[in-house]
Image: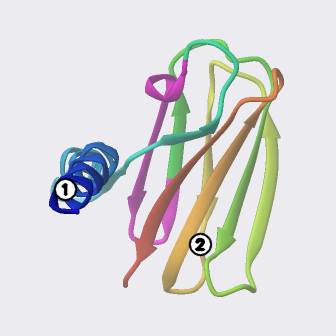
Amino acid sequence: MQKTKLKLFVLLVVFLLPTKLCNVFCAVHNDESTNICIMATHTQGTPRSSSIMASINGHTLSIVFLDNLGNVHVEVMSVGGGETQYQSTPTPDGVDFYITDTGSYIVYFNLSNGDVYYGEFEVTD
């Protein structure tokens, strides 16, 4: 019984640790903006999350695509429902969104090959 609990605990740590480390390393603050950690939800082949840079500065969400990922559909939605914004953009390029209300948000990136990435962020002021 103890071995089973230990195995479950180790598996839990192995699966949760990378997520928590990403949050620690991605939540980088500088004088004006906060970087947003981009995670993969569905990928075909090699993940391309490192090709997407996103940051929040006040109410402005800035997104830069470092590589040519084709046409990317970007969706920004409030966690509590309500505000949702969409934009489709070619890459490599960048796009900005103005977030009117404070709160918790998720940004989704749908690539033309079917890959889906997301990032979570807060608008506080």
Query: The magenta stretch spans which residues?
Result: 47-61
Q: Residue at x 18, y 55 (%)?
A: 6
| Res 8 → quadrant | bottom left
Mark 2, other Cα within 10 Å: few <14 / some 14–19 / many ≥20: many
Q: Residue at x 50, y 62 (%)?
A: 60
Label 2 sits on what residue type? Ile
Residue at the disc numbered 1: 29
Q: Residue at x 83, y 25 (%)?
A: 112
Q: Is residue 48 magenta?
A: yes
Task: State the CA–CA distance, disc 1 to disc 2.
Answer: 19 Å
**Residue 4 position within the rendered picture, expressed as x and y whole percent measured from the top left:** 26, 55
| Res 114 → quadrant | top right
Quarter of the picture holding the C terminus: bottom left
Asked which secondary structure carries label 2, the reply is loop
**Residue 5 position within the rendered picture, expressed as x and y whole percent measured from the top left:** 23, 61
**Residue 82 position within the rendered picture, expressed as x and y whole percent measured from the top left:** 75, 86
Residue at the disc numbered 2: 99
Asked which secondary structure carries label 1, the reply is loop
Q: Between residue 46 and residue 122, name the one nearer to us.
A: 46
Quarter of the picture holding the N terminus: bottom left
Q: Does residue 72 appear left or right of residue 105 in this picture?
A: right
Q: Does residue 4 appear left or right of residue 65 in this picture?
A: left
Q: Does residue 7 appear left or right of residue 50 in this picture?
A: left
| Res 98 → quadrant | bottom right
Label 1 sits on what residue type? His
